[in-house]
Amino acid sequence: MNKFVRSLLGQTGLLVAFATTVATTFASSSVQAQSAAPAASAAAPAAAAGAKSVETKVAMCIGCHGIPGYQATFPEIHRVPMISGQSAKYIVSALNAYKAGERKHPTMRGIGGGMSEQDMAEVADWYASQAKPAVAEKPSREPSAQVAALLQKAACTSCHGANFSKPVDPAYPKIAGQHADYLFVALKSYKNEPNNVVGRSNGVMGGIAKQFTNAELKALAQYVGSLDSEMQVKPQSRFR
């Protein structure tokens, strides 16, 4: 009898041990599965967000730069510049200038200030990829004698290159065909360098712009803005 009881208890112990092991293994697997499920669920939106990251970043730009004829009101009314087709390195340089306060524009400083270097590079590459066919090295129209003299004095092609569209350094902008009213406002801004509210801080451009009256700067802007351009305003209604 005692042998039977001991045998029965031994078998029961084995069954209990086996059941405990199975239960523990099952519970562990359930916890791992539950932990993995949220991670997998989080990974999918993260991957989707990564795929749309450039569109998300550019979405804050298209409300001004993606609308033909859209005008800004600071520091005076003018069309916002065309940036589709502009060189990527220049766009990054301009955004950093706004971020650092070297260019004083409240909206653009707010936008630039919230962008990382990667953000700037992705946005710049996106806009640079939208260039129109390259323009010829010779301007599509000749300047008047007055404007020719102003261009020679300003030495614009020494930085902005042939036809004002082949900058000697991609950090310099293409300006051929850019909106004339924007060019005029930009040129005047370099004359306001010491101002804490408006203006742009650039030693080279400041020295050039200060040589001219506003009427002369307008004549320069109107001629350069009348040329064929590699830039354009590419409408973007919305991103899905």
Image (cartoon, helix red, strand yellow):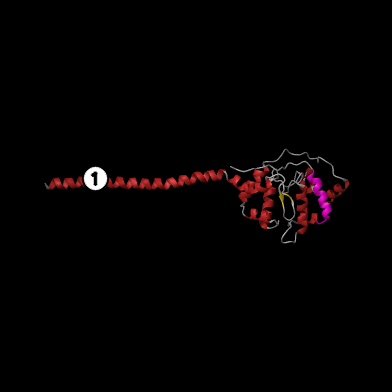
Q: Is residue 155 visible?
A: no
Q: Is 193 within the magenta?
A: no
Q: Is residue 9 visible?
A: yes
Query: With respect to residue 127, does 105 lie above or below?
Result: below
Q: Is 224 within the magenta?
A: yes
Residue 136 % position (x, y): 78, 38
Region of the chain picked out in magenta, as a range: 210-226
Tag count in the figure?
1
Within 10 angstroms of label 1, few (less than 14), some, or many (20 or more) residues?
A: few
Q: Nearer the viewer, residue 51 or 138?
A: 51
Residue 1 % position (x, y): 11, 46
Residue 80 in the figure: left or right of residue 6: right
User: Pointer 1: what residue?
Assistant: 15
Quadrant of the image containing the C terminus:
top right
Which residue occupies 42% across, 48% down?
35
- The amino acid at mark 1 is Leu
